[in-house]
Amino acid sequence: RVHTATGSRLVLATLGQAIVALGRTEGLQVHRSWWVARRAVARPLADGRNLRLELTNGVIAPVARTSVAAVRAAGWIDAG
């Protein structure tokens, strides 16, 4: 499912194919089934050890624990 500022729709492709189709759009695969564009991140949501990203369209994207370091290194969340 692709979520945009104007809504969401189902796209029949693997996540890998969809990421390739995005070209040079800045973003990260933050979970095994989620890729997030940098410009879509409104704010991080921390709940104990869990991290999620609130997107500008209101969708909440999970962040895998193995991806937290990459999200932090990209500057999407504070280093603390």
Image (spheres, grey):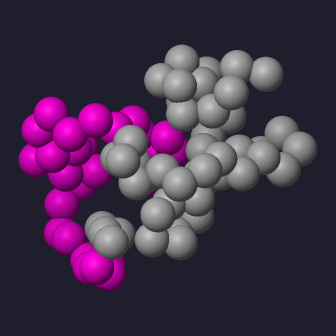
In front here: 46 or 15? 46
Q: Quadrant of residue 48?
A: top right
Asked if 73 appears above or below 76 in the picture, the reply is: above
Q: Which residues are magenta?
A: 6-33
The residue at 54%/18% (across/down) is: 73
The answer to whether 16 appears left or right of 29 in the picture is left
Quarter of the N terminus within the rendering? bottom left
The residue at 48%/50% (across/down) is: 41
The answer to whether 30 appears left or right of 11 in the picture is right
Quarter of the C terminus within the rendering? top right
Estimate the x, y position of residue 23 in percent, counting from the top left.
11, 38
**Can you see residue 18?**
yes
Estimate the x, y position of residue 70 in percent, counting from the top left.
52, 23
Residue 3 on the magenta span: no
The residue at 34%/38% (across/down) is: 27
The answer to whether 45 appears left or right of 48 in the picture is left
**Can you see residue 70?**
no
The residue at 45%/71% (across/down) is: 57
